[in-house]
Image (cartoon, rainbow, N blue to C red):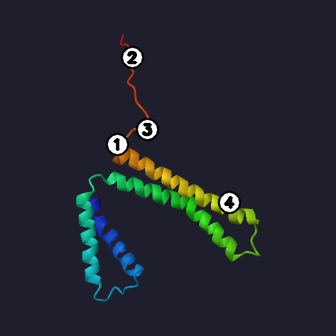
Amino acid sequence: MLATCCGFPLCFTALRSATLALFSWDSQSRIWLPVNLLLLSVISVLSFILRDLGVVNSLGGVTLGILIQLVFPGLMITWTYRAKLGKWRFGAFEGTMVAYTLIGLGALLFVFGTITVLWIKVFHFRLYRTTTVYLPTS
């Protein structure tokens, strides 16, 4: 409870600042109050709809994990290769094929991870059957 009470204002401030920056709105303008009310309304409605925050946490983990581990490095390799085409230390294979392979693998694992999370957390299917083995007692 204490973590939620102390952490929510920090997260909300970052969300509000990012929303204002995304739409190029000034924080001192008249749009500030409606943005606050809209964001708080969306958060309140989502809190009534969502019963299990584990699904949101798992989907966030899948998304951010894949982006950080595979997609962002692939994009950085691609952009660096294009920016330094003549001065690239590695060959064209690393600048194109390795980067595109990382991005493609990231997309594939994102789809697989999202399906797995939804399959287990939302639809409550098990990936394997469990059996109970009773050992004899002495």
Q: Amino acid at mark 1?
A: His
Instruction: Check residue 98 in the rendering and tell me which mark sits there, or answer none.
Output: 4
Query: For the residues marked 4 and 1, what is the alpha-carbon distance in whole angstroms?
Result: 37 Å
User: Are discs 2 and 3 less than 8 Å apart at CB?
Assistant: no
Q: x, y (%) of residue 93?
A: 74, 62
Query: For the residues marked 3 and 4, what is the alpha-carbon distance in whole angstroms?
Result: 32 Å
Q: Amino acid at mark 3?
A: Leu
Determine the image quadrant of residue 6: bottom left
**Which residue is labeled 3 in the image?**
127
**Which residue is labeled 1 in the image?**
124
**Height in image: 17 above or below 123?**
below
**Which residue is labeled 2 in the image?**
135
Mark 2 vs mark 4, foreground winner is 4
Label 4 Cα crowd, 10 Å radius (few <14 / some 14-19 / many 20+): some
Secondary element at tag 3: loop
Of mark 2 and mark 3, the one earlier in the sequence is 3
Q: Amino acid at mark 2?
A: Leu
* Residue at 39% across, 16% down: 135
Label 1 Cα crowd, 10 Å radius (few <14 / some 14-19 / many 20+): few
User: Are discs 3 and 4 less than 8 Å apart at CB?
Assistant: no
User: Are discs 3 and 1 less than 8 Å apart at CB?
Assistant: no
Q: Amino acid at mark 4?
A: Val
* Residue at 34% across, 68% down: 11
User: Are discs 1 and 2 less than 8 Å apart at CB?
Assistant: no
Of mark 3 and mark 4, the one earlier in the sequence is 4
